[in-house]
Amino acid sequence: MLRNINGILCYYVVMNENLTGKINSLRQKYREIFKTTAEEIQKRTDELKPTGAGDIFDSYDANSEGAKWQTAVLKMFEDDISKDIIKKWAEILAYRDNFKCKGCAVCCNLACSEFSPEELKQKALSGDNFANQFLGIFVPYNSKDEASKIYPDYIKLLDDTITDPVYFYHCPKLSECKRCTDYENRPQICRNFPDNPLSVLPDSCGFYEWKREVEPVALMLHAMVEIMDYYKQKIELAQKIDLQNYGKEL
Ligand code: SF4
Ligand code: SF4
């Protein structure tokens, strides 16, 4: 699985024989959690529903009870659920402090991006801080084959699941004995890694247990964000259609 941060698909690899199985199991778990979360959000939406209103995604006249319901649901997302997500995510990250890096160096040895080095340079020049830091750390592998020799399972997984190009990078500051040669000055994204329990981590990673423990909650939070985005888009579209109809009637 790739993790998308500031538009960069930055990835730190897994090395084990059953990588595909783990990804499939994660997807299955996510499907189940997504369904339960969608039902919960639907329930909370229905609790605000005025008598006689139709579907939350219907197009209602402005100032009608239906339109007020839609506004109340969007407000609930903003004031209630979103704040709860931010709080829980902060707790997940704070809990990571109970775990430590074991120095396996996997995350230094393979990072992937959907962007080529040239594209990353452009992003960095236009002020993308993550792209800037990423380029300050990683250099591209000479070839996919070179990356593939190091992590064949992972490269195969990408080949099997992603059709868009993926570029492979590694950090030249990693010594032959797998130590960071500039540890005291390592950039923030190295210090923060892993900052997302939904990244796939190697079994050798000291944060693997953290990921395993918090993953169900992280999946639920991820599902909440996706579902709320869906609601927001559909409600905004319904309200826009109503405004267009209103304009025609004038
Ligand atoms: S700077 Fe050090 S910690 Fe960061 S990726 Fe390179 S070797 Fe790893
Ligand atoms: S233990 Fe985890 S964070 Fe530390 S080097 Fe290995 S993959 Fe990176």
Image: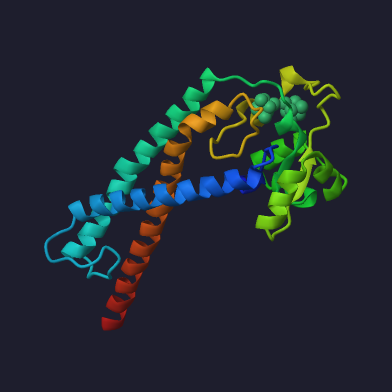
Q: Can residue 80 be seen by looking at this rendering?
A: yes
Colour mapping used in the image: rainbow
Residue 144 in the image, given as x and y percentages of width and height: 82, 49
Residue 56 picture quarter:
bottom left
Residue farthest along the bottom direction in this orientation: 249
The quadrant of the rendered image in which ligand 1 is seen is: top right
Name the side, left or right, on which 248 lies relative to 21. left
Q: Nearer the viewer, residue 157 or 178?
A: 157
Q: Is residue 142 above or below residue 212?
A: below
Q: Is residue 121 visible?
A: no
59 versus 115 height, above or below: below
Residue 239 location in percent, x, y? 31, 67
Residue 196 falls in which quadrant of the image?
top right
Residue located 29% across and 72% down the image = 242
- Is 242 on the left or on the right of 69, as rendered? right
Task: Name the residue: 56% across, 49% down.
Answer: 24
Left or right of residue 216: residue 51: left
Residue name at image x 74 percent, y 48 percent: 155
Look at the image and tell me in which quarter the C terminus lies: bottom left
Q: Position of residue 215 (x, y in %)?
A: 48, 36
Of 120 and 109, which appears nearest the observer?
109
Residue at image coords 29%, 49% = 40
